[in-house]
Image (cartoon, rainbow, N blue to C red):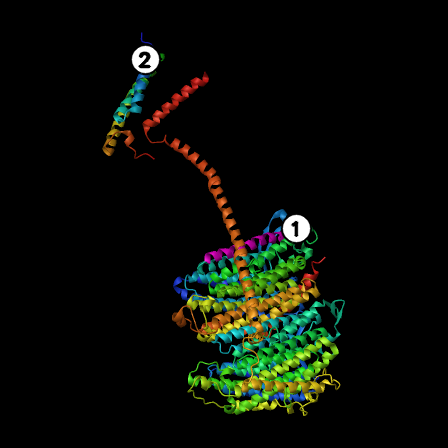
Amino acid sequence: MISLVDFMIVSAVLFCTGMFIIVSKKNSIQILIGIELMLNAAILNLVAFGKYDRINNGGQMFALFAIVLAAATTAVALAIILNVYKQYKTIDPDKIKQLKD
Amino acid sequence: MNILTLLIFTPVLFGLIILLLPSSMRASFKYITLLTTLLQLGFSIWMYLNFKTGEAYAGISHEEQFQFVQKLPWISLDLGGAGKMQIEYFVGIDGISVTLLVMTSLVMVIAAIASWEITSNLKGFFALFLLLDMAVVGVFCALDFFLFYTFYELMLLPLYFLIGMWGGARREYAAIKFFLYTLFGSVFMLLVMVGLYLSVKDPVTGNHTFNMIQMMNPKNYIDGSVFSVLSHQTILGMPARTVGFVVLFIAFAIKVPVVPLHTWLPDAHVEAPTPVSIILAGILLKIGGYGIIRICLGIFPDVAYSGAYWLGLLGVISILYGAFNALAQRDLKRMIAYSSVSHMGFVLLGIASQTAEGISGAVLQMVSHGFLSTMLFFLVGVIYNRVHDRDIYNFRGLGTLMPRYTVYVMVAFFASLGLPGFSAFVAEAFSLAGAFKSHNVNGLLPYWMAVCGAVGILLSAAYFLWTLQRMFFGTVSLKGGEIWKIALTDINWRETATLLPLALIALALGVMPSLVLGKINDSVLALVQFTQTVFQK
Amino acid sequence: MNKALPYQDIQTIYFAIAVVVLPFAAFVVNLLFFTKSKLSGWVSTLAILVSSILAVIIFTRVWNVQQIHVKYLWFIIGDNYLYTGILLNNLSVLMLGLVSVIALPVHIYSTAYMKDDAGYSRYFQYLSFFCFSMLAMVIMDSLILLYAFWELVGFSSYLLIGFWFDRANAVQANKKAFIINRIGDIGLLTAIIILFNQFHTFDIVRLFKEGGLIANSTIKNGLWISGNIQTPIIWQYIACIGIFLGVAAKSAQFPLHTWLPDAMEGPTSVSALIHAATMVAAGVFLLGRVYPLFNPAELTTLAVIGCFTAFMAATIALTQNDLKRILAYSTISQLGYMVMAMGIGAYATSLFHLVTHAFFKCLLFLAAGVVIHQIKHIKEDNNLDIDPQDIANMGGLRKKLPLTFITTLIGGLALIGLPLTSGYLSKEGILVQAFEWAEHKGSIYMLLPVLASITSWLTAFYVARLILKVFYGDMNLPTLHPGIKIHIGDGGWRYKLPLVLLSLCCLFPLFSFNPLLHTDSWLLYGFSSYKDYTENIFEIIVPVLVNVLSLAVMYYAYTIYIKQSRWVSSQTGLLYRISFNEWYIDKFYNRVVVKSVLILSDAVFWFDRKVIDGFVNLLEKTGVFIAGIASWFDRHIVDGILHLAATTVQAIGGFARRFQNGKVQYYLFSMLLAVIVVFILKILIWN
């Protein structure tokens, strides 16, 4: 029987992996992937905790909503990255410093 | 419009005009300045002619006896519980100031003419010159201590720049020395002034006041205040009034100058351009003497009375010390500067005697020295402008090259050494007579001081005659050779026009001393009366 | 003006003013209009001519008739009213007449003597100015004005001595003359101030008349008392010393006599008028004015000094070679007689000698001027390098300059005091009274008249030497410089007339109809203090003895200089050297007095530079040093604290700034770190 704790462990691993990717990678795409991983860790948690709301299935519903939202943000983010690349010929976030104070 | 106010502020007005005019019109500045000084001379002569004499116009300690008075509230602050701060614009003259004012105006005209030699930064020079003019005239007119002090300090500023910017090689040193000396004196004067302010109450309004005439009345002093006659306050263990007197005396003694506070004078003179030398010797030194009479003697007569011996001693030392120093000089201007020290010693000696003869002699000596030193410095300027040298050893036989110049030099020298017929003789003789008489009249000065002072007259003959013989007589021999011989042309009409009136005035004052003495006599008598009665216990 | 005066007196006063003002007017006119013209000489001469005529008129009106005194208010100082006034009494009209009458021939002489000089007009300006001051001095009624003109006289003498101002000697001499006179002036001024303090007036009449202020002042218990003024007695002495200094300087008495021989650098006509006849007599005149001030002891001192001066100057005159210098020393010597006469109470005789001396000494100088002028001609004609005043270059001029010779002879005899001359009358008067005086005083005082008599013989010797060397024998120049041309003569009437006039005045008839008895002179009776001594033995012995010995001395001189049969003393002897070097007095003054004054002045200047200025500079340096410390403190301590604060803030800021590097990952990382830290802390603290 897969217990809630197992879900949480998977989710935590996912989250930590995503977090590590975000902090350490120098490629915006990879960072985006890290963000996605963290999102999925959250969604996994939502689904796992959804068992406490069996009447409205709020957890499932919110997970679906979050997936859609994540897809949308990813699309936007990719668009930004593409444009950034066009502008700066790089997608390394450290090198894009024009907005820096 | 009050004539004194007009007299004081005319130069500022024209000074502003000069500042506003574009530099392209710089050639006109000297004419504007000359016009100003002539205008001022006109005012002062009008005043001299309309000056009333008689016991009812003696002045000194009676406010209603001053003439051409103007009194306006100037700074009037309500300080709540501490009463009202009362500073007035209060000008007026009595016999002591009137002749000095005429002398000042005339010397200013001469100085303006001497300014023809100035070539650089004309706008600055003439603006400062006129500012200085205002300040010195103001000092002689002010009857409010605060106003007096303001003018007194205002004098320093233009002088510092005039010496420091248009002076000779060591001008910065001289300017700083001059500035520090005089500032040293006036800073402490400020303290005494404030002390006096806090000690004196105007009997009419009940406020503290800076009015100098009210400071001369012992009744106006608040009981227990620092300078009160009755309360015997002390400062650092010394009687407060003595300290006050000494501080004020030092401030003025620096101006006079009295040995040993004189060393700024030779340096300042040597470095200053001719017009500034003229103003320094002609007017500035007189402010010292005037201050001693008006303020030291007027406000602290009791201390002046008890300390007269020391004043007289300083006077005698100045006479002899200055004369010996003059004998040792080889720079013509420096020699004349030291002779000024010697001649101003007579002023101090005369004042210290506190006899009518002595004080009259002192005032006459101030007026006379005003004209004569002006003449002397102008004469040095003449030769310096031509060859830029004034070392006595570098010239010989100028009498052959510049006969008219030599005549004026002889007039100035002999007038200065006290030849009868010129003003200095009467002045010096009566300063000495007053000093001698003092022992029998008020017992202030011992007899020997007058005799020692007389030796100063002998020494002045020695250094002036030596210079004449060394520089002007004998066969022509110049350090600069033929070039100098060509450069040393005789004086031109502008210089003659300057020197001739001065020589004539010195002569007129010597033949008719009443020109001065007639105006000052009542005031002097009132002053003598005042110093010996009012503050005495 | 005093309205009570009768018309004639007012006229006399106007005359007196005119006498004084005319030369001044001439001075002004020459100064303004005739600076280049030869007319200036005649302007001055005309002025002095009118002056002298008026002076003689005044003399006849006032002499022994009355005293006229008017005064006007001059100025007020304090409560003293100063008057300027004119006092005409016997003394002043005598001097007035003397000065103007002597000045007249000198002016005439000068128009010729100075005619080739470039400064002709300047000369007459000065000369007129001198006459003005001298004439004004004698009639002034107030001490302060007397002093004023006294000094102006000295000033005009200064100008005239230094007339040739391009000559170094002349300007040295005039400086010396003025400064020595200044010493006297200071003394006189001090004396006047003392008198003013004592009596509160400068009025000569009030002070010195009989029963005047001086006469009423008393000396008691070491105090000098007049009215309620008491002064220590010492000041009475100092007043007398002061006046004596004045007299000594003007009248060239020891120790202030050294200027007079040097003053001969001026033109000879000036020497005649100023340095022989008039100005130098001013000292004696002053003594006459203030005579009542002196008490017997002071008068005795005066007599001693006068006598010593007479003797000393006579000894110096023995060996001098400069013609004018000899005459200058003889002037000093004669002035010594006058001062001595004043000292012994022979007031009238002293003034008598003043008058007679003025004439014969003026004459001698003018004659000397002719001689010098002629020698100078020879010098210029032949381009010789000789001193025209050296008597060694002269000799045998008797035939070339006959009139000059005769007049010099008359003058010389008057100077020696031989009978028939005016000099005899006055000099014997002095000697006789000196003997009488000494007889009264006691034995030691006998030295004085004896010394005076010796002086008289010395005078006879040097006058004889002078005349013999100049006029007798053979001229030395042609032997020294063979082939020179000598065209000389007495000169025109402008030379001759003054000489003749003056030599007439040197003879006895002008002063007394009895050529042998001095007491018959009219002049002596013009002065109240003249005491007619009873006839005594000295009246006969002294003149006879003195004159006989004088003649002997002159013969002795004749044997020396003309016959050359003997020689008095070797030219290297001690006495000779003392005499020749003028008793070393001048050298002493130069080496000791002048040097020490100069050293003192240098020392004072050193003191000024090093001590007073040093002190000021030390103050300045101390100030700068303190300021340096303050500035260091400011920079390192005060600023240090401030800087520390700033640096700390900066460090903290810099540290915080590192978090704001704009890298989103870094932000995230630090957030994570913070969360972790908080978490760990929370766990740790909670446990």
Residue B130 forms part of the magenta stretch: no
Res B140 visible: no
Disc 2 crowd, CA 10 A, few/some/many (<14, 14-19, 20+): some
Q: Position of residue B205 (x, y in %)?
A: 65, 54
Q: Nearer the viewer, residue C165 or C475?
A: C475
Q: Nearer the viewer, residue B32 or B381?
A: B381
> Label for residue B478?
none
Residue B173 forms part of the magenta stretch: yes
Mark 1 and mark 2 residues within 8 Å of each other at the beta carbon: no
Secondary structure beneath disc 2?
helix
Left or right: B86 as drawn, with respect to B114: right
Left or right: B203 as drawn, with respect to B13: right
Q: What is the span of residues highlighted in magenta in the rendered image?
A: B171-197
> Label for residue A7?
2
Question: In the rendered view, would you say A9 is above or below C648?
Answer: above
Question: In the rendered view, would you say C84 is above or below A44?
Answer: below
Q: Residue at x 34, y 11 (%)?
A: A5
> Label for residue B238?
1
Disc 1: host chain: B
Res B239 visible: yes
Most common secondary structure along the magenta stretch: helix
Disc 2: host chain: A
Look at label 1 and name its amino acid: Met
Q: Position of residue B206 (x, y in %)?
A: 66, 53
Calculate the distance from the C-alpha at mark 1 to the C-alpha at mark 2: 99 Å
Secondary structure beneath disc 1?
strand
Quadrant showing the C terminus of chain B: bottom right
Disc 1 crowd, CA 10 A, few/some/many (<14, 14-19, 20+): few
Q: Residue at x 71, y 86 (%)?
A: C539
Q: Nearer the viewer, residue A76 or C544?
A: C544
